[in-house]
């Protein structure tokens, strides 16, 4: 269970605004996070992952404090072991597709399955600059799953995919999420983009 009760000041076009989130994410659940641009959707994911520090409050995972402002607790991203899909993919330019996954895990069978799931099994030796935008996006998703995380944070993960590829991938991903028992948070500025994703919804802003 991920319990989030945090506040963070955000810079907005009209000055500062306060992002306040109080939410419990049930283990194994999928939550679609929607809201207008600048509302704080990406900031929320990065605070949960430990990449941005909230101004106040707490973040707990299965009763373990990841962040507790009052007690000065702030675990590193490595300690939190979250699978994160960045909006800009954040791929390593000098690593091949397969090396991206081997960097995260030495489970060859799992790597093979992920490559097939993402339709990248014929591109294992390619580096990111030789992949299309959709292929790069799928690689970013596979890399996040490689560590078999219990919490998966996805920032606009399907924006570069055509409808057919997205539908097939979402179907396969939901099977993997269930197998991992992972809690999954998916951000999108376009709710229609998450058609086919079954789960709860959290609207910000």
Image (cartoon, rainbow, N blue to C red):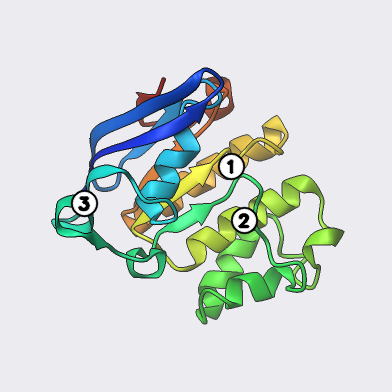
> Residue pushed farthest front?
15
Asked whether the beta carbons under mark 3 and mark 2 sit within 8 Å of each other, the answer is: no
Is the Cβ of the residue at disc 2 closer than 8 Å to that at disc 1? yes
Which mark is nearer the camera, 3 or 2?
3
Label 3 sits on residue: 69
Instruction: Tell me the element at label 1.
Output: loop
Camera-side residue: 201 or 119? Answer: 201
Which quarter of the picture shows residue 6?
A: top left
Which residue was labeled with disc 2? 140
Residue closer to the observer: 1 or 22: 22
- Nearer-the-camera pick, 129 or 173: 129
Between discs 3 and 2, the one toward the N terminus: 3
Task: Please name the residue that numbered disc 1 is placed on.
Answer: 157
Give the camera-side residue of 17 and 114: 17
> Disc 2 to disc 1, how far (Cα)?
8 Å
Find the distance from the CA under tag 1 to the CA under tag 3: 30 Å
Q: Position of residue 139 (x, y in %)?
A: 65, 58
Q: Earlier in the sequence, mark 2 or mark 1?
A: 2
Label 3 – label 2 distance at C-alpha? 31 Å
């Amino acid at each position: 269970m991920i319990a989030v009760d945090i506040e963070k000041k955000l810079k907005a076009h009209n000055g500062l605004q306060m992002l306040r989130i109080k939410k419990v994410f049930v283990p194994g659940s999928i939550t679609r996070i929607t809201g207008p641009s600048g509302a704080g959707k990406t900031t929320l994911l990065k605070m949960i992952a430990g990449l941005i520090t909230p101004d106040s409050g707490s973040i707990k995972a299965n009763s373990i404090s990841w962040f507790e402002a009052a007690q000065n607790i702030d675990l590193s991203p490595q300690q939190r072991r979250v699978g994160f899909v960045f909006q800009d993919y954040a791929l390593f330019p000098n690593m091949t597709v397969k090396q991206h996954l081997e960097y995260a895990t030495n489970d060859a069978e799992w790597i093979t399955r992920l490559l097939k799931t993402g339709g990248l099994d014929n591109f294992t030796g390619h580096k990111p600059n030789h992949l299309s935008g959709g292929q790069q996006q799928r690689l970013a998703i596979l890399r996040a799953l490689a560590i078999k995380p219990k919490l998966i944070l996805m920032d606009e993960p399907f924006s570069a995919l055509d409808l057919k590829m997205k539908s097939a991938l979402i179907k396969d991903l939901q099977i993997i999420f269930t197998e991992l028992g992972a809690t999954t948070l998916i951000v999108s500025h376009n709710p229609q983009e998450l058609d086919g994703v079954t789960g709860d919804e959290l609207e910000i802003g």
